[in-house]
Amino acid sequence: MHLIETRDRLLALPALEDRMSVLETEVRETQANLSKLLRKYNKESRDVEQLQKGSLFAFLLRSAGKLEDKLEEKQREEINAKLAYDRTATHLDNLTQEKNELASRIAPLKAEEEIFLAELENRRAKVIQMLTEPQGIRYTELKNERNALIPQITKLKEALRITSLVISTAQKIAVSLGKAGQFDPNFFISRGILVPTISLIASLGGRERHSNIVNAEETFPILVSQMRELMSELRGIQDLHTSSLTEILSKPLNMEFVFSVAFTNLPMHDQIRDKAQEITHILNVIRDIEAELISKLTEQEDKYTHNRRNEEELLFSIL
C-alpha cells in the first residue's frame, strides 16, 4: 500500500464531507419549501376550479360583473404558483444529483481511509516494540511531545471559551449603559431649555433608564465572577500578558449608582459615562488577551499538526 499517495488523496475528504453537510441541509430546506409551494399551488388551483364551476361566490361575482376579472387574477396566481413549484422542483433535482455524485466520490475515499488507518495502527504497534532502536526512540519523542501539547491546547480552548463569556457579558452591560445614557441633560441645557421642561422629557424615559441601570448593576457581579474565573485559567498559560486584568481585579469593583430625586441631574449622567468607560476598558483588556490566546492556540495547533505529520512519516518508513 502506497501510504503517502493514499494520505494525499485523503486530504480532499474533509472538504468533500463539509460540502456534503451543506448539501444535505440545502436538500432538507428545499424539500420543505417544495411542500409549501405544492400546498399553495393546490389551493390556487382549487380557487380557480371553484370560480369555473359556478360556486355561490362565483355567482355573486358574476352578478356584480366582476367574475372575469377575479377569474383572470386567480389564474395568474395559479400559474405563478406552478412556476414557483417547478423552479424549486428543478433546483431540488439538481441538488439531489450533486449530492449523489458527491456521495459516489466520498464512499471510496472513506473505504480507503479505513484501510489507511488500520495500516497505520499496525505499524504503530510494530514501532512500539522497537523502543531501543532509532525509530522507536523517535516515536517515543513524538508521543511525549504530543502528550505535552494536548493539555496546552485544551487549556487555551477553555480560556478562550471563558474569554468569550466575559466579552459577551461586558457587551450586555455596555448596551444597558448605552441605553441608560441616551438622555443627556447637557444636550438640552446647552440649548437653553428650561429645567422643568427637561424634567418632563426625562420622566418619559425615566422608567426605561432605571431598568437599564438595574440590568447593568445585576449583570456586573456575573462579569466580575467570570473575570476571576478567567484569571484563574490564565495562570497556567505561560508568556501571557495578564497584568492589565490583574490590575482591574485588584481594585474594588462595583456597578452601583447613587440616585437622586430628579433624573435630570448631571452627576447621574456622569456616573453612567464613567461606568461605561470602565466597561470599555475591560472589553479592551479582554480582547487583547483573546487575541493573544488565539495566537498561542494557532501556534500550538500548528505544532500538533506538524507532530502528527512527523509521526505519519515515521510510520511510513516502517516495513
Image: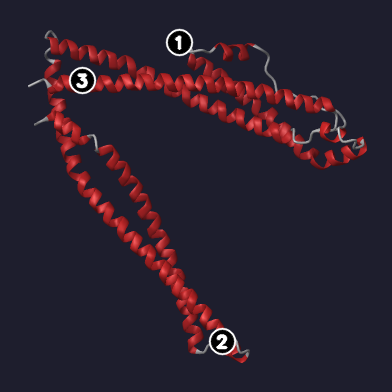
Name the spot of residue 187 as percent of width and height, x first. 82, 34
Instruction: Report the amino acid beneath label 1.
Output: Asp
Residue sitting farthest toward the left? 319
User: Which scheme is used to colour this image of the protein?
Assistant: secondary structure
CA–CA distance in space, label 3 to label 2? 80 Å
Q: Earlier in the sequence, mark 3 or mark 2?
A: 2
Q: Residue at x 29, y 39 (%)?
A: 15
Name the spot of residue 113 as percent of width and height, x first. 18, 36
Residue behind mark 2 = 67
Query: Which image quarter: residue 179?
Result: top right
Q: Earlier in the sequence, mark 3 or mark 1?
A: 1
Q: Which element carries disc 1, helix, strand or loop?
A: loop
In the rendered structure, find residue 239 and report the number of the disc placed on it: 1
- Asked if residue 285 can be seen in this view, the reply is yes
Please tell me whether mark 3 or mark 2 is closer to you in this view: 2
Q: Residue at x 61, y 91 (%)?
A: 63
Query: Which image quarter: residue 251?
Result: top right
Residue behind mark 3 = 311
Instruction: Report the amino acid beneath label 2.
Output: Leu
CA–CA distance in space, label 1 to label 2? 81 Å
Q: Which element carries disc 3, helix, strand or loop?
A: helix
